[in-house]
Image: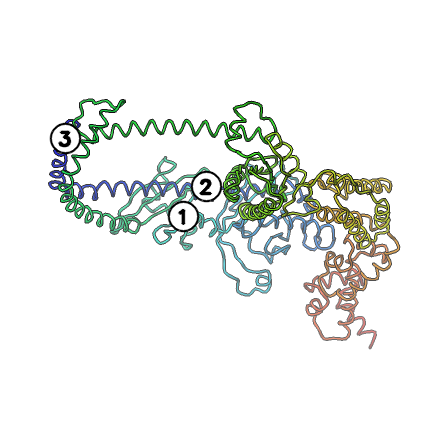
Amino acid sequence: MKKIPVQLQLFMILFLVLVIPMSIISYYSSSSMMRYSEQEIADSAMTKLDSDIALSEFTLNNVIADVLKLVKENKFNTIKSITSYSDLNSDYETINSAINILDSMNEMLPNDNTIYSIIFYLDNADYIISTNKGIVRLKYFESMDWMEAAMKEINGAGGVWYPRLLNKATVTEIEKGTSYSESIHVISYVYRLNRLTTSTKGTIVVNVNESKVCGFFNSNKHNSVSAGCIIDTKGNVISHWDKSMIHQNLSHDNYVKRILETKKTSGCEYVDANGERTLYTFNKSPFNHWIYIATYSMDALLEKSNQVRTNFIILTIVIIAVGTVITVLVSIRFSKPMKELVKNMKAQAGFEDKGNKNELAFLAAAFDKIREQEEDLHKLLKDREMETKYLAVHKLLTGEIANSAELEEIKKTFPYSHYIVSLVSIDNIKSYLKEANPEIRSYYRYLLFDKFENAFPEDYHVCCAGYEAGTIAVIINIEHYDHVRVPKTLKNTLNQIKAIAGEVLGYTVTIGVSGVHTGCEGIKECVYEASEAVKHRLLTGRDSIIFWESQEKETKKFHYSYNSEKKILNFLNNGDFDSLKTELKEAVNQIKEEKDISNDNILLIFNQLVGATIKYLVEHNINTSKIFRSNINIYSEIAGLDTVDEIEEYLIEIFKSILDYTAPGRQNSETKYCEQILKYIREHYKEDIILEDIAEEIGISYSYIRKLIKEETGKSLIDNVNILRIEEVKNLLLHSDLSISQIAKEVGYRNNQSVIRFFKKYEGISPSEFKHLKQKESN
């Protein structure tokens, strides 16, 4: 073909197009197009299924990880011997331990929104701890008979996933025997506590909402033509878009039967049945040996493809007809300038004539050669430029520019002599580093590089680079420094950058701006000044733009107020929390009012106050580890806070912890507290009294409440409540016609058994015997 002239080739092409166009179009549209479409759909469906499985199993594995984390906390040992609901509620320590376990279980809920509820059942206990119903008697909870079947499937020290129907009836509905609420399909993770983890014998159950799991592989824009389900190796349905199919066995279905029998771990198949064509995809996951199946209606998926194919045929016919006429008319005029161009190119050096009579073939070869040479040259120059620029900018920030080649590259990037450096520091950096993984942080960083550079005016030469601890350095190069115009422009632009960073990162930023320096050698000084400016966030606060000021202004130091320290320690010793907070606030305000105080000086003030506090605790034989616990390294915590207001709040929490711990030693307040506690009991003894409510009402810790009541009355808080209740029971027995059950509810007991038991405990006889004796005495 290369030796055939262009005009002759055009006529040959026209002939072929006119003779066999319809046969080519028909073959292509009816076979190749459909085959490729179906293959692409199948590949896409398998990819989507793999993605949905990964998302589903990632979520379920998180559930398992959270359960193991809960077990490692070893909180179950505190109630391992308490199998009676009454015993659990009779002592504050045991009920508090149970509440701590419930709190730990509740902490798992925000981690994964697929969890419906979490249950802990202690072997042989008559109560259940549940996140959705609290701590309730076993008889008022849903039936746990299903656990026997689930336990048989546990193999080894791990747990087992068990699909079931969960009764959503409330405690009140079960207790009263009324009609139950609706049920919900769940996939329960059953984990049996064992000797490898804890000495407690019990079972943790995490109920995962089946609809949430099903949503992972049914959430797509083709819901009307696709459906998914999960089955086990026996064909039993674990999750299904049609809820009526859950717990059914699909092994009788021909396709499901083939999946169960095949040794393949994944695959797809087109099935024609009842006039419909359906795509089946499956994947046998090693996770719990589940099998994921998804189906797609091909008729619906290919409806648009069939329409496109028809339009394509019509369009092709029109193009052929119009193109034939146009080609004949244009070919004559097209050939002459093409031949002239080929002749001129052959006369140029570097373009060899290899005997090609076809002008198009010659031009194509010549243009390909030109394009290859141009691309190679452009790539070489670009790579060299980026490598040199990156290395030069990195050395520029650290002040390590050493050779003339690097200086030349810096002059290309920054042609002007005046430099300013801005450091963009993320506020609450610890939280940001914890939430964003390295890949996300890298993506955000390069995205912000581009946005920051484009935010500046065109006459500013700007380049961004990564700096320490997630900080972004913005190097600004300007021709002339105007003391009025440049700071104003910088402030407006940096405000835009601050807003951009907040939108991208979801965190506010503080920007430190250096002074202006001339020459590359001044960049290192610019970086230092910008770093020092960022440190002034302590006083300025977060979400700020801080311009560096001369270091000479920081020669005036803030002298530590020993008077404030003595007052704070005195208030701490006397338990006067309000005065302590007021004095600490005054000390902080004094720091804020002090002009040009250095960052190091501020930290020194707070560290000295912390040191004096610790010395006070040691001198008074107070165990600091019991007070501070995880906050034992207070100095590091203070150094990691952004502002003095945050340091003030943190110290207030520390002092509050100390006061709570040392409260029992302040005897002068005990009488007042006892009166308040006894008054509260007299006013609320008919209700369910919770120690935390009394503590919040009075303003002291609940452990301190127990101690005061015991010392004042010689009885526990529960005994005092029960004595008041029994006195009221005696009054109602003699002066009302109420039954024992009615009296129980009237005085705050849940049932008549509780009334009888406590009546015998405190009076020595039953209520009926007491009433009989009193009636006999009156007669």
Which secondary structure lies at badge 2?
helix
Q: Which mark is residue 54?
A: 2
How crowded pointer 1 is (Cα within 10 Å; few <14, some 14-19, many 20+) is rated as: many
What amino acid is labelled 2 in the image?
Ala
What amino acid is labelled 3 in the image?
Pro
- Closer to the N terminus: mark 3 or mark 1? 3
Q: What is the x, y in percent for residue 368?
A: 28, 29
- Closer to the N terminus: mark 2 or mark 1? 2
Which secondary structure lies at badge 3?
loop
Which residue occupies 11% across, 38% down?
Answer: 15
Establish if 460 lies above or below 667.
above
- Closer to the N terminus: mark 3 or mark 2? 3
* Label 2 with label 1: CB-CB less than 8 Å: no
Establish if 358 lies above or below 724.
above
Looking at the image, residue 189 sits to the left or right of residue 313; the answer is right
Looking at the image, residue 340 sits to the left or right of residue 250; the answer is left
Looking at the image, residue 9 sits to the left or right of residue 460; the answer is left
Q: What is the x, y in percent for residue 358?
A: 17, 29
User: In the figure, residue 224 lies in which quadrant?
Assistant: bottom left
Residue bearing mark 1 = 229
Quadrant into which the C terminus falls: bottom right
Q: What is the x, y in percent for residue 752?
A: 69, 65
Q: How is the image coloured?
A: rainbow
Residue 632 seen in the figure:
no
CA distance separating discs 3 and 1? 63 Å
Q: Which mark is residue 5?
A: 3
- Number of marks in the rendered image: 3
Q: Nearer the viewer, mark 3 or mark 1?
A: 3
